[in-house]
Image: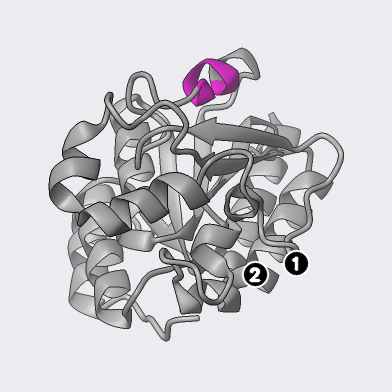
Amino acid sequence: MHDFTMPQDVIDRVTARAGRAHPFDAMDPARTALVVVDMQNYFVKPGYQGEVPAARGIVDNINTLAAALRARGGHVIWIKNSTNGTAESWSHLHQHLLSPERAARRYETMDEAHEGHAVWHLLTIAPGDVEMVKKRFSAFIQGSSGIETHLRARGIDTIMVAGTATNVCCESTARDAMMLNFKTVMISDATASFTAEEHAACLIGFYSIFGDVQTVAEAIASLDRGQMQVAAE
């Protein structure tokens, strides 16, 4: 897990703009989903091409937040990246941004029939959780997955984003969710990237403009505040 603290000058800037340090400091659990992005063997298991070693360090935090949200009536979605059917539809990635060897390995080992596609075994998927496939870095971009329709049908307007990599699929998913009018929180100690520098740069940029960044403990406190507010109405 990366050692990260939001710089005070960034907090001050957000506070001046939003009126408080955490724009989403009260989240109604019943209208909140934890979206866990790409915590698959391809990204978590040692030896895979997409391995993000720090992702193994956030497993307990993801399980903790997922359990807390479930206990409060919220929803957990496990997003799994898939290469099935993307060789032509996403040809620029496979033909120009990856070497032929890396493209072939990515395509093979993130196939839905391959072990690499499966969620890392130490993560707890509970009854009532949903596993969902996406075909792009962002789960929300058109044609990638059915997550937007799924969330709207459940009356969910707030998402917390966890998983890996912070600055690739997590950030892409979080930014697109915000653009689609979901209240979006990136969880700083339940996301991981290739380096601490990339992780920090992403979270600072997202918090500065797009949404909120909270720790697991802060997010649970925000869920409790939201639940109390709803009960008081």
User: What's the residue at 33%, 47% (across, down)?
Assistant: 211
> Please, which residue is most extreme toward the left here?
96
Q: Nearer the viewer, residue 232 or 59?
A: 59
Q: What element does badge 1 sit on?
A: loop
Q: Nearer the viewer, residue 87 or 1?
A: 87
Q: Which mark is residue 45?
A: none
Is residue 89 shown left or right of residue 38? left
Density class for disc 2 (Cα within 10 Å; few <14, some 14-19, many ≥20) is many
Q: Nearer the viewer, residue 33 or 8?
A: 33
Q: Main secondary structure of the magenta part?
A: helix
- Can the viewer see residue 81? yes
Vertical comparison of 191 with 185: above or below: below
Name the residue beneath numbered marker 1. Answer: 122
Q: Which percent across, then down, holds residue 117?
A: 59, 48
Vertical comparison of 61 with 79: above or below: below
Which stretch is magenta? Answer: 146-151
User: What's the residue at 58%, 75% (across, down)?
Assistant: 56
> Please, which residue is most extreme toward the bottom here?
3
Amino acid type, label 1? Leu
Name the residue beneath numbered marker 2. Answer: 59
Q: Which percent across, then down, holds residue 171?
A: 33, 51
Say whether residue 180 is magenta. Answer: no
